[in-house]
Amino acid sequence: MTSRAAARRALAALAAVVIVGAVALLASCAGTYTTISADTVRERLDSGERVFLLDVRTQGEFDSGHIPGAVLIPVQQLKSRMAEVPNDRPIIVYCLTASRSAEAAAMLSAEGYKDVFDMAQGIQAWRGAVER
């Protein structure tokens, strides 16, 4: 084997290692969360479990009706208000239909929050009490 061929093989092996490492790094930063049904959220709340219930809709949507105990941080403000979200308990995120909450859940997970849940179908699927 010539030194040129050996150098190419070594370079190809190094490139493979770099690519695998980059993929692993991106996967760890992507942010993972779990989808949870509205019924399961209600069961967890009814059981007295200590969770942080995060509503990521607008102020007007929140005022028109929200799950009791929810904290409003609109998804557009979440990045700048991340310090208001505790990391010592599960976080359940919801919006109207689950599109903004999925975005927020991914943001929280990417910031290192571990126990993040996105309420499937949003508040439209909620069958419990609502505060106005």
Image (cartoon, grey):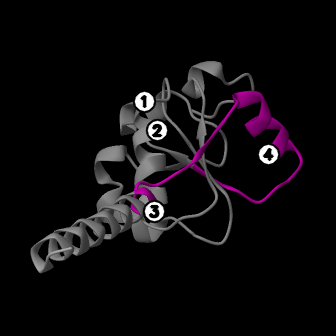
Residue in the picture at 64% in, 59% down: 115
Mark 3 / mark 2, whichever is N-terminal: 3
Indicate which label's residue lies in the foreground, 3 or 2: 3
How far apart are labels 1 and 2 at the CA level? 5 Å
Residue corresponding to mark 2: 102
Residue numbers of the magenta segment: 27-53
Q: What residue type is labelled 4?
A: Leu
Residue corresponding to mark 1: 99
Which mark is drawn over residue 45?
4
Q: What residue type is labelled 2?
A: Ala
Q: What element carries label 4?
A: helix
| Callout 3–callout 4 Cβ contact below 8 Å | no
For mark 1, does the 10 Å Cα neighbourhood hold few (<14), some (14 to 19), or many (20 or more) residues? some
How far apart are labels 2 and 4 at the CA level? 20 Å
Which mark is drawn over residue 28?
3
In the foreground, 115 or 32: 32
Q: Is residue 55 magenta?
A: no
Indicate which label's residue lies in the foreground, 3 or 4: 3
